[in-house]
Amino acid sequence: MRSAVFYILFMMHFTLFAQPAITGNLFNNYYYLKNVLIEGETNINSFNFLFNNSKINIIPVKDKTKNFTDKIDIVEFFIPVRSFRGSNYLMETDFQELLNAQNYPMVKVGIERKKLNELVSEDGNSKLSFYLTIAGITKLIDGNYLINLCGENEIMLQGSTQVKLTDFSINPPKKMLGVLQVKDLIFIKFDIIISTLNS
């Protein structure tokens, strides 16, 4: 009886804290979101916020059909807004308010599975389109990516793009009676590890 209870508790812990593998009909690759970096500028200085998944490893990944007409198979990564870290807690609080974390606690990155699987056999860098959801608004974004080998059966997709806050209905904030103005353009970089061990 004691061993059965231990097994159930262990499986609950594994389910809550492990990032699940995504499987498909033709591929059995594993996708792991490692880092997301958001960089921006004010009229005075620059700032950045980093999400490092290796420290918590609780980000769910799931299949998603983008719409039932086109049957686009999407691998979607969920990033808690409150998990981004800045240079101080006041900046983190401002960042959470800016992205309306109370009502929209997740930033989401969605990439077409077919494209992800094609990347396994590609070299170099190229263009990449993906879905980005910030503050409840989803946009199809164009970016760039670079592929690097990071192990015998793993590659790293290093993606980057730039977006405007106003594209997501976010007004760049002003601080100190308007003396400090956040610029509209922000830069986003992310690293996704694709394991081909079981492909």
Image: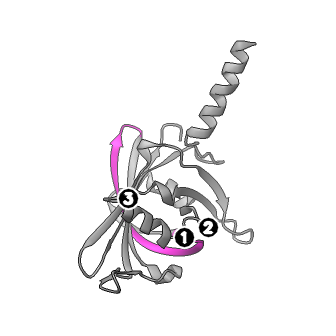
Could you tell whether 15 is left or right of 196 in the image?
A: right
Please state the extent of the stretch shown in magenta in the rendering: 131-153
Q: Is residue 22 visible?
A: yes
Neighbor class of circle 3 (other Cα within 10 Å; few <14, some 14-19, many 20+) is few
User: In the shown orientation, is residue 86 left or right of residue 17?
Assistant: left
Query: Which callout, 3 or 2, points at the residue further toward the start of the chain?
Result: 3
Give the number of the mark in front: 3 or 2.
Answer: 3
As displayed, is residue 147 above or below residue 11?
A: below
From the image, tell me which residue sits under label 2.
103
At label 3, which amino acid type do we have?
A: Tyr
Q: Position of residue 49 (x, y in %)?
A: 37, 61
At 31% across and 59% down in the image, what residue appears? 87
Name the residue beneath numbered marker 3: 89
The answer to whether mark 3 and mark 1 are in CB contact below 8 A is no
Mark identifier at residue 100: 1
Q: Extreme front residue here?
A: 177
- The reply to whether the C-beta atoms of the residues labelled 1 and 2 are less than 8 Å apart is yes
